[in-house]
Image (spheres, rainbow, N blue to C red):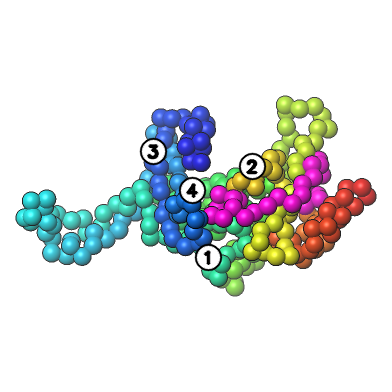
Amino acid sequence: MSHYLKTTMDCIFGEENFRNEIVWCYAGGGIPRLDFPRKHDVILRYGKSERVFNVERKSYGSHAESGRRATDLGGTRSVAYNPEGTPINDWWVDITPLINWHKERTGYPTQKPLALLERIIKASSNEGDIVLDPFCGCATTCVAAEQISRKWIGIDVSSKAYDLVKERLDKEVARPDELPHYRQDVHLQARPPKRTDVEAGYREEKYVYVISHPNYEGEYKVGIAKDVNARLNSYQIGDPERSYSLQYSLKTPLFRETENHIHKVFPNKHEWVRASLEDIKREMHSYLSY
């Protein structure tokens, strides 16, 4: 998928601003029977000519202790090593993915570890800079930015993301005496700017979708998407068995209100709702016909 995405990113950011294709390698999870296991993600890095780049270094390894290294001819030669270590490469194997019992887990299938976002943010910004995540979902970027003293802005189509940002900041960042500060300074703006390219009174329609996964029996992910098939595919990418299934979708201009209603009516954890599929569908239609 990354090759399709890169052509799009080249159009948006400019091919000349492409800097790195970073490969994040990991282990764990399912293993397909007829393919090589998919155990890496690709991160595309772009930057303007006047850009921040903070080098992260790692140890040279045990061979550096003696200050000598073997050559191709079997001999040795003296080598001057940087006491701070050598820069990390564009393939990362030292950051483990999140598994089900990990304390960072929120239930989002595409959630990434804090360590990964912290590395990306540290490399590309300085303390006090502003970090933007226009698809902040489970708030990992926001939490990572807060932990390393960056300002941040998170955007997500689901208002549940706002609740999750507050919950994770309370749990993972703030000390007890700092909780009032975080609760006052994290603001929700649920009214997007008015579009100037459409007529007055226009309301965009989106789908409220219901997705299932066999690992979450009796639970359904209820969310919002403009293209439900693209959203389903985004979840399938992170699942070697591609077990997510679209159970239902409903297109409406009241997509945000409908999603909020479902999450208020039924017990839920973030976007996963505990109820029968028929009850969820019935409640959606009942709300829209009220």
Q: Nearer the viewer, mark 4 or mark 3?
A: 3
Q: Nearer the viewer, mark 2 or mark 3?
A: 2
Q: Magenta segment, which residues?
A: 235-259
Q: Is residue 89 visible?
A: yes
How far apart are labels 2 and 3 at the CA level? 27 Å
Residue 99 image label: 1
Labels 4 and 3: the sequence-earlier one: 3
- 4 and 2 marks in contact (CB < 8 Å): no
Q: Nearer the viewer, mark 1 or mark 4?
A: 1
Residue displayed at 69% across by 40% down = 227
Whether 10 is among the magenta residues is no
Dot 4, how many residues are within 10 Å of its Cα: few (below 14), some (14-19), or many (20+)? few
Labels 3 and 1: the sequence-earlier one: 3
How far apart are labels 4 and 2 at the CA level? 32 Å
Residue displayed at 61% across by 58% down = 108
Residue 19 image label: 3
- Which of the two residues, 54 or 33, is positioned nearer the viewer here? 33
Q: Residue furthest right?
A: 290
| Whether residue 93 is situated above or below residue 254 in the rendered picture | below
Residue 129 image label: 4
How far apart are labels 3 and 1 at the CA level? 31 Å
